[in-house]
Image (tube, grey):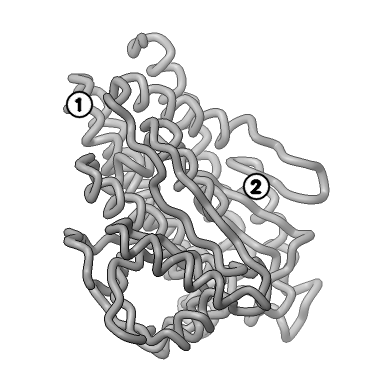
Amino acid sequence: MIIDFEHHNTSNCETGTVLNLLNFYGVRLSEPMIFGISAGLLFAYIPIAKGERSVPLLGFRLFPGVIKNNAFKKLGFKISKKQYSKKHKDEAMKDMDELLEKGIPVCNRVGMYFLPYMPREMREHWNIHHFCVIGKDGDEYTVSESLFGIKKISYDDLIKVRFSEGKYKPRGEMYWVEKTPETLPDMNKLIIDGIRRTCDNMLDYYGFPFVAYYGVRGMVMLSKYIRKLETKLGENAPAFLAKIIRYSEELGSGGAGFRFMYSAFLFEAADVMNKPKLKDFSSQMNNIGILWRDFAVDGCRKLKNRNGISYKDLADKLLSIAEAEKDFFMTLKKYIKTECKK
């Protein structure tokens, strides 16, 4: 049995899963629009939470799961979610099967590493991947994979990724639409709220001192960290830099990727709201995304000892990105406040 489910490939698993699920229930929104109204753009530097090789965690978007929750809440959808202990993994599969029998697509949060179709170069012990299960035939499931298309996965493999170990264990997490709204909210209001919240997060979201730094402040703090990298770490500095670059360019669509997505959101919002000025902001955000890409390229040059790039150069470049984003969000916030009334 396979649910009649129209699949669309997207650039990010969480926004893509939301897009495909909304589309199933008759709501057609683009991935950038979902990202924008959910205020998905952010920057987070979390020195106290260490990732691989004790590299401080970095984030270029809201924390995993928050975009999904924001999108469904803003659009008026009621979502149900369940998690299970590992000893109840058979119950977790049974509950999902019962929903599938009713024709209800079931989204899962899983670990990426043991997905059988995951390319070797993308395998990561990362337990925040999302996809939607849309069918079952015997012991084989059909999943809508936002990044890879329609895929097949066995019963045993699906259990393995639903109950993968490590940080942020999914614990068999599954979620599905419990109730759809009778009418959709006004998109203009959702766009304005999303932009305002993003501006506030990037400019005023300070978090807790010595625990995490968000928005522009987080970029400034990371630049200070990079500036002292070689002095503090010596021969281990390149390994740290490599991981920082991977966070910024690969994991979760990367920093530049989310900047380009936000640029696309502003471009689309300009037409929805009939506010052509937002297309100028879209162009500016696109240029900021290019700055992030340039930062990653220079970081790679440093790792290969090319062009005489130093850690100071990288720190300076990141500081200039922070200044560009600060100016951008201050100007955008002022424009939304004065020119875009609810």
Tell me the number on the disc at residue 218. Answer: 2
The amino acid at mark 2 is Gly
Q: Is residue 261 left or right of residue 209?
A: left
Q: In which quadrant will I find the N terminus?
A: bottom left
Residue 293 shows in this picture: no
Name the secondary structure under disc 2. helix
Name the secondary structure under disc 1. helix
285 or 78, which lies in front? 78
Comparing marks 1 and 2, which lies closer to the viewer?
1
215 or 304, which lies in front? 215
Q: Considering only order in the chain, which callout, 2 or 1, is on the residue closer to the N terminus? A: 2
Above or below for 115 versus 229: below
Q: In which quadrant will I find the C terminus?
A: top left
Above or below for 123 versus 29: below
- Residue designated by label 1: 272
Dot 1: within a 10 Å radius of its alpha carbon, few (fewer than 14), some, or many (20 or more) residues?
Answer: few
Q: To which quarter of the image does residue 59 belong?
A: bottom right
Which residue is located at x 70 percent, y 50 percent?
221
Dot 2: within a 10 Å radius of its alpha carbon, few (fewer than 14), some, or many (20 or more) residues?
Answer: many
The image position of residue 186, as x and y in percent, is: 29, 20
Which residue is located at x 78 percent, y 42 percent?
208
